[in-house]
Image: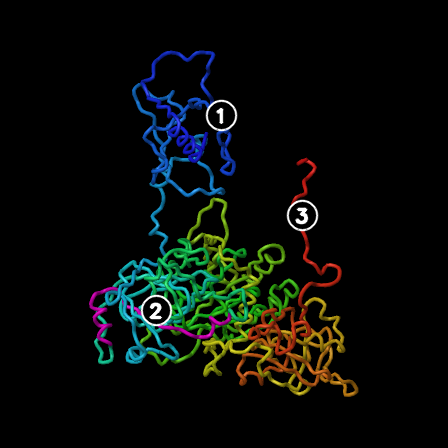
């Protein structure tokens, strides 16, 4: 069957010469002659690249084909449709006209498939496809359309100050009025304050009494969508309330204020080029009318290739909602374990569950058991956190100093499974003794949330086979969870909020939830990219000072990206007096001799650990004396195991930027407040390394590092590698098997 373009050319040739007009007459009942059987339908598709052209030497009129275009059908003036008669009218009843196929006109593209009558059995009718096509408005990220002075006004810095909102360095703000079920999606970073009504963000309902929230929405992760739940009353008529805001509130809807947020996290793209422009989106000209003029955030209306919406699946919502039904005030706050294979949405569900629990409890504990994809700390740590605020953003936007943690030094527990389980057991015991039922007096009496109990959310690793399955079973036996959320595809391919209730060892019951795995993300980022970003965000973060109580969490609120790590002033530490020991862990660490310690520690990531002196000596075969006859002044013993988790704690990570030749002084970079550094008397070096982005000088355009040429920078090799295996491995995919020849 000829394509539409070939038919157009044939029609033009016929009109220019002597067009043959074929009239459709009623079919007679005469039987076809046996010498001229009907022409069968061709199953051969004509490529769009090679269209048949008439021969130049052919002067005779072309033979009539089994279809002919109508004489009034001028393809040159046709704008919307191309009408082609049916292939054969043998099956038509007497006196009926052949059906017409209406195909939407499209620009010619060599890569686009050619639709002809030979594919009628495999390609549905275009009219049915258009009718069954979903409404494009169902996929809109933002149904809100800003109209100045109607549902959208600008607020100056004086207006923000009069409203007693935390302005800080923010000099811009907007007030929006959303109608029920109306949505708005923004890419960037901003603060959110509800004035009246209620709003749903990432499954959490926010009201006017919930305060101000920081929202980080880069393109590297699914972006949250704000949806109006219900309208509120009139805005409070205070002397400091702007009149424009009062007029906006009289029209009903949910009134919210978005403020500019400049924390420095958007500048991390300068350090790690993989996340460059992650907080910015290229808005087409058609979306310029949706500009809110908010410098740190941009409104997104249509779905884009690099913008993915954060969604909660129905089975997720059902399992979380079941927790708040018939809740007994005297019951245990609950231990919630999230497990399943990797890339199924465990971390996303754990954060949704954490935020939902914060609507009922003032504080919620979070135990991080995933060494590779940690949520609040860099990888390699088993950490316990106690949170009191909602978290809206990916992991690198909220680095946190844990309440208590243990350093494993690797992104997988493969090399130290016993130490990994001991660390988890120690943190679970600490939670049950000091965190689960705290005796704290909260000053805010207007908050009706539960303050007597603190639930626990545990995010497990994605290693579920072999040794990973054994470790997962041991973790479940240690924590004894009351709720287990399993990401798996059952045989019957259905998901229920409550799958089964199984008695535990301690006599209580464990409720198992079967959850639907999330679809794989279409964003072009790998787990290694997120680990790199988490590590760099940690070292560039500014943490607040010491907390007043043991359960006060220290979360970074700003980032200093003005200078690279190589240009910062480090701590100069005397290794002989500041440390009681240096321990190396991981495969091959027992073979490091003291004379090679300088090369091992130079540029290494280490854990700052505090432990009892007796526990350190018990963990080693013998005390670690310093030999005055040698130049090595650091207390190091090859093959020493890490300190026992029951008598030690990790306060954070540090970068050993340089080591003196005599090992007398170490230059250390760490974001930990100086008040905590006095407790850290042990350095533990694991398998983790500083990402290559952290070694470079992003402030230099010539590629040099701290004024040193690229080719002379130590520990960095530029260009092509040398030696056997230094080149990139080439894979040939054009080889055939024996059966394919």
- Asked if residue 648 can be seen in this view, the reply is no
- 247 part of magenta stretch: yes
Vertical side of 215 occupied by 37: above or below: above
- The spot of residue 61 in percent (x, y) is 43, 23
> Which residue occupies the foreground of this view, 664 or 87?
87
What element does badge 3 sit on?
loop
Please report the residue visible at 30 percent of the width from the left and 22 percent of the height from the top. Answer: 96
Q: Nearer the viewer, mark 1 or mark 2?
A: 1
Asked if the residues shown at circle 3 and circle 2 are in contact, with their CB atoms under 8 angstroms apart, the answer is: no
Within 10 Å of disc 3 (Cα), the crowding (few <14, some 14-19, many 20+) is few
Q: Which residues are magenta?
A: 242-268
Within 10 Å of disc 1 (Cα), the crowding (few <14, some 14-19, many 20+) is few
Q: Please give the residue where the numbered disc 3 appears in the rendered image.
A: 732
- Asked if residue 726 can be seen in this view, the reply is yes
What element does badge 1 sit on?
loop
| Lower position in the chain sequence, tag 3 or tag 2 | 2
- 658 part of magenta stretch: no
Residue 422 lies left or right of residue 181; in this view the side is right
How many circles with numbers are drawn on the protein?
3
Residue 508 lies left or right of residue 100; in this view the side is right
Vertical side of 446 occupied by 250: above or below: above
Q: Please give the residue where the numbered disc 1 appears in the rendered image.
A: 58
Please state, as top left, top right, bottom left or bottom right, where the C terminus lies in the image.
top right
Within 10 Å of disc 2 (Cα), the crowding (few <14, some 14-19, many 20+) is some
Q: CA distance from mark 1 to mark 2?
A: 66 Å
> Which residue occupies the foreground of this view, 227 or 677?
227
What element does badge 2 sit on?
loop
Q: Please give the residue where the numbered disc 2 appears in the rendered image.
A: 293
Vertical side of 488 occupied by 40: above or below: above
Q: CA distance from mark 3 to mark 1?
A: 49 Å
| Lower position in the chain sequence, tag 1 or tag 2 | 1
């Amino acid at each position: 069957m000829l394509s539409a373009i070939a038919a157009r050319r044939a029609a033009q040739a016929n009109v220019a010469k002597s067009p043959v007009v074929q009239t459709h007459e009623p079919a007679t009942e005469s039987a076809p002659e046996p010498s001229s059987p009907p022409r069968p339908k061709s199953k051969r598709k004509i490529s769009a690249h090679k269209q048949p052209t008439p021969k130049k030497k052919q002067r005779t009129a072309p033979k009539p084909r089994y279809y002919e275009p109508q004489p009034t059908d001028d393809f040159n003036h046709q704008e919307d449709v191309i009408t082609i008669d049916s292939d054969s009218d043998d099956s038509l009843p007497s006196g009926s006209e052949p059906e017409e196929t209406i195909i939407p006109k499209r620009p010619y593209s060599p890569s686009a498939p050619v639709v002809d009558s030979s594919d009628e059995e495999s390609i549905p009718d275009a009219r049915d496809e258009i009718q069954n096509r979903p409404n494009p408005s169902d996929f809109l990220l933002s149904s809100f359309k800003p109209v100045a002075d109607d549902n959208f006004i600008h607020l100056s810095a004086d207006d923000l100050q009069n409203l007693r909102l935390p302005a800080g360095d923010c000099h811009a703000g907007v007030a929006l009025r959303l109608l029920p079920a109306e949505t708005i999606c923004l890419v960037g970073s901003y603060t959110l304050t509800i004035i009246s009504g209620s709003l749903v963000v990432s499954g959490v309902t926010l009201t006017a009494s919930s305060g101000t929230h920081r929202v980080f929405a880069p393109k590297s992760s699914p972006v949250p969508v704000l949806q109006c739940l219900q309208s509120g009353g009139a805005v409070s008529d205070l002397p400091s309330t702007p009149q424009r805001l009062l007029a906006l509130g009289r029209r009903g809807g949910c009134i919210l204020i978005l403020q500019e947020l400049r924390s420095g996290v958007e500048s991390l793209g300068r350090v790690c080029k993989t996340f460059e422009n992650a907080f910015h989106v290229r808005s087409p000209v058609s979306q310029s009318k949706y500009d809110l003029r908010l410098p740190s955030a941009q409104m997104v209306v249509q779905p884009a290739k690099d913008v993915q919406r954060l969604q909660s699946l129905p089975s997720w919502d059902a399992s979380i909602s079941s927790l708040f039904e018939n809740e007994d005030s005297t019951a245990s706050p609950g231990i919630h374990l999230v497990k399943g294979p990797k890339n199924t949405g465990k971390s996303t569900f754990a954060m949704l569950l954490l935020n939902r629990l914060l609507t009922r409890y003032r504080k919620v504990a979070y135990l991080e058991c995933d060494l590779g994809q940690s949520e609040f700390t860099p990888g390699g740590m088993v950490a316990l956190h106690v949170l009191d605020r909602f978290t809206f953003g990916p992991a690198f936007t909220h680095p946190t100093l844990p309440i208590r943690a243990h350093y494993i030094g690797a992104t997988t527990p493969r090399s130290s499974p016993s130490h990994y389980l001991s660390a988890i057991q120690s943190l679970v015991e600490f939670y049950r003794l000091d965190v689960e039922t705290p005796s704290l007096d909260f000053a805010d009496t207007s908050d009706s949330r539960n303050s007597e109990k603190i639930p626990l959310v545990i995010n497990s690793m994605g290693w579920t086979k072999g040794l990973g399955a054994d470790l997962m079973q041991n973790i479940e036996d240690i924590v004894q969870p009351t709720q287990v959320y399993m990401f798996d595809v059952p045989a019957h391919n259905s998901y229920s909020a409550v799958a089964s209730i199984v008695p535990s060892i301690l006599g209580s019951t464990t409720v198992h939830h079967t959850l639907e795995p999330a679809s794989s993300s279409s964003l072009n980022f790998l787990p290694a990219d997120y680990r790199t970003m988490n590590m760099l965000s940690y070292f560039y973060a500014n943490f607040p000072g010491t907390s007043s109580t043991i359960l006060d969490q220290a979360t970074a609120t700003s980032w200093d990206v003005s200078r690279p790590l190589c240009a910062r002033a480090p701590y100069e530490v005397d290794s002989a007096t500041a440390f009681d020991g240096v321990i190396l862990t991981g495969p091959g660490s027992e073979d490091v001799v003291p004379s090679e310690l300088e090369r091992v520690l130079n540029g290494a990531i280490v854990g700052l650990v505090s432990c009892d002196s007796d526990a350190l000596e018990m963990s080693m075969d013998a005390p670690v004396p310093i030999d005055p006859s040698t130049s090595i002044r650091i207390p190091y013993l090859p093959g020493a195991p890490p300190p026992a988790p029951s008598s030690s704690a990790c306060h954070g990570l540090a970068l050993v930027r340089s080591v003196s030749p005599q090992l007398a002084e170490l230059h250390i970079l760490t974001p930990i407040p100086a008040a905590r550094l006095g407790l850290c008397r042990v350095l533990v070096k694991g398998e983790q390394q500083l990402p290559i982005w952290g070694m470079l000088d992003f402030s230099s355009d010539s590629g040099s590092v701290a004024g040193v040429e690229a080719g002379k920078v130590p520990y960095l090799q530029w260009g092509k590698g040398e030696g056997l295996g230094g080149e990139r491995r080439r894979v040939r995919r054009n080889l055939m098997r024996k059966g394919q020849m």
